[in-house]
Amino acid sequence: MSSPRSDVLPKGCPPKIRLAGVATLGLQPAASSPAIVYDGRMFKSRRAFLRQSLGLAGLALPLLAACSQTAPAATAPTPAPTTAPAQAQAQTAPATVAAQPKGVALGKLPSFVPIQNTVSPPDLPGSADGLVNPGWISYPKQLFQAVKTPPGAGGDVTVSLESNNPPFPPLDQNAQWQALNKAVNAKLNVLYIPFADFDQKWAAVQAGNDLPDIMCTITRPSTPIVPAFLDAKCQDLSPYLAGDAIRDYPNLAAIPTRAWKSALVNGKIYGVPIPLSPYFWWFWGHQEVLDKLGVGYPKTAAEFKETALKVNDPQNNQWAIGSEGGSQYAFSTVNGLWNGVFKAPNYWAVDSNGKFTYLFETDEYKQAMTYAADLYKAGLYHPRSLEYNTLSARVDFMARKMVFRFDGLQPSPYWGGSNAQPMDPASHITLVPPFSADGKSKPVYYFGRPNFGISLLKKSGDARIKELLGILNFIASPFGSQEYELLTYGVKGVDWNPDDKGNPVYTDQGKAEIGVFGSAWYSLTRPSAGYYSPADPKAPEIYQGYEKQLAPLGVEDASIGCFSPTFAAKGVILLDGVGGGAQDIIAGRRDISEWDQLVKDWQNNGGTQIKDEFAKSYAQLASA
């Protein structure tokens, strides 16, 4: 399991603004405002995005990183399950369990085999390694069938789903659910878990005796996945998925290798990932402000400060840069901006001897922290940076109350021109090209965590495991397939109708069944990311171009695929101490002379043990 990321949520964080799962906004696109489907998410218009981001009508923006320590707490009701509870027994489950792995190397990952879509191929193909996502200029006129034979055996299959949406309509009123049952040849019974209550409900699921057949969970420190639970009650999927065995499930084989690494626990594949694109954090700038001053984007840390001083205009309510508060951000020195510029580790680094180092232990991090403190002292950070959450900081950035912003959301809301707030001059938000501190060494870009979560399978017989994997393979069907259309939009003529260009537009029933934040079925797994914009055909090319800039600079967190029980138990608490101390130093509330002791406290209170556990896990995988 990987290290703390943008979804490590401090106390007081509103729970409804944490999710970055599949989010397809069921709203008709405005003609002048681009929309995009990316990483399984659609934003149909800038207006739709802003309605969600401002929390109107009780809605909340789906984010992994969405709140600060000072954000007011919010509560959410716990909807009842929409159908049969988790205790419902699958009628077709065999009495025996599947055979244990034979001849499968420890830590052997599934082969990566991209889908060969010749019926509705992308207009902009992605890269062979999956790091540059494909794009479609328009919605395909013809769809292909990704799953030729229904995978189910005709009986009941109980699944747990999580979502920020209210529970969707019951089966007898839900056209999509009915069509999905027919397509997979199974009766899918649902245990619905609201995202706001996920950790509590997931703990109850693990403690119970009657588990769902397929269980979604979330890969983050606050959602513990205990190895003893996996060993006792969950299926080791290595015999079915490791290496070329995954070719039996082509859509799962098309999930990039990096997403599978967090499905490894003690060298065994215990789940099917819900993949995330590596490009979660983006550094954005108001291009129009720089154009007005006749300056370009900076190429060194010193140039950034010079540019920041030029654009900083507090008298007109415009600051150079803004960040959210919290130990997992610390003025963007933890989540990948300044620690990336100064080349501290992407959370964790490992040397040739297998020794792990945490970013806070490095001189490079201390340089990044000192640099951020210098910017803060110069008055370049928006004065609300200690109290912002990601949502409120984003709204002020789009209103040009800050010129630069490092933001943890997929790129859709940051369209220049037509998708920006009406301003004079018009807003034009673009990606800031990565740069290194000295401008001489190669810049780096820190890839985000590889998946949102994984789906675990209850221990069952061989035929049952293959059936369940077949259902997940159906759900992972890619863009351009009939299966994707059903899962994303529902039933044509009931849940959606095409507009004059053939783009799917939700009906009221479709909005109720799919929900504002997208299909809950994608909380089990989903296809890899892709770009499609029904309102702006230029969108896929622009964002694919950004990915082509970032992909060669990508650096992974070295802990991905390793497991530390101490980190799982204490990682968030320890981060609050050292990351919170860094934030205080940057803000001038503590002296930098205290830093070395803060790092020693982290080491003594569990950090050294975490490093040793990661090293042991890493060695086990390396020797396999």
Image (cartoon, helix red, strand yellow):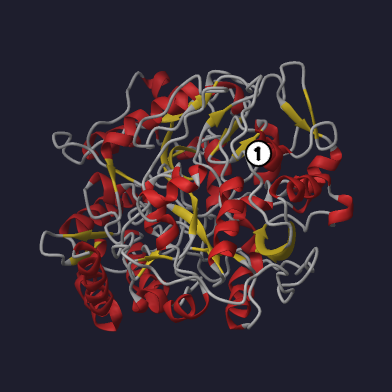
Point out the image quarter for the C terminus: bottom left
Kind of residue at disc 1 = Glu
Residue 20 visible in the current orientation: no
* Between 150 and 141, the one nearer to me in the picture: 150
Query: In the rendered picture of this protein, how many numbered marks are placed on residues?
Result: 1
The quarter of the picture where residue 584 lies is: bottom left
Q: In the image, is 594 to the left or to the right of 11?
A: left
Query: Residue 491 appears at what percent x and percent y?
Result: 79, 37
Residue 601 visible in the current orientation: yes
Q: Which residue is mark 1?
A: 483
73 relative to 377, above or below: below
* Between 5 and 602, the one nearer to me in the picture: 5
Q: Residues within 10 Å of mark 1 (few under 14, many from 20)?
A: many
Q: In the image, is 603 to the left or to the right of 133?
A: left
The quarter of the picture where residue 237 lies is: bottom left
Q: Please report the residue visible at 25 percent of the width from the left and 36 percent of the height from the top.
A: 435
Q: In the image, is 374 to the left or to the right of 181?
A: left
Q: Please report the residue visible at 51 percent of the width from the left and 41 percent of the height from the top.
A: 410
Query: Residue 192 appears at what percent x and percent y?
Result: 72, 64
Query: Residue 22 appears at what percent x and percent y?
Result: 60, 47
The quarter of the picture where residue 128 lies is: top left
Q: Please report the residue visible at 33 percent of the width from the left and 67 percent of the height from the top.
A: 267
418 relative to 203, above or below: above
Residue farthest left in this picture: 353
Query: Residue 135 appears at what percent x and percent y?
Result: 50, 26
Q: In the image, is 465 to the left or to the right of 576?
A: right
* Callout 1: SS: helix
Point out the image quarter for the N terminus: bottom left
Residue farthest top in this picture: 500
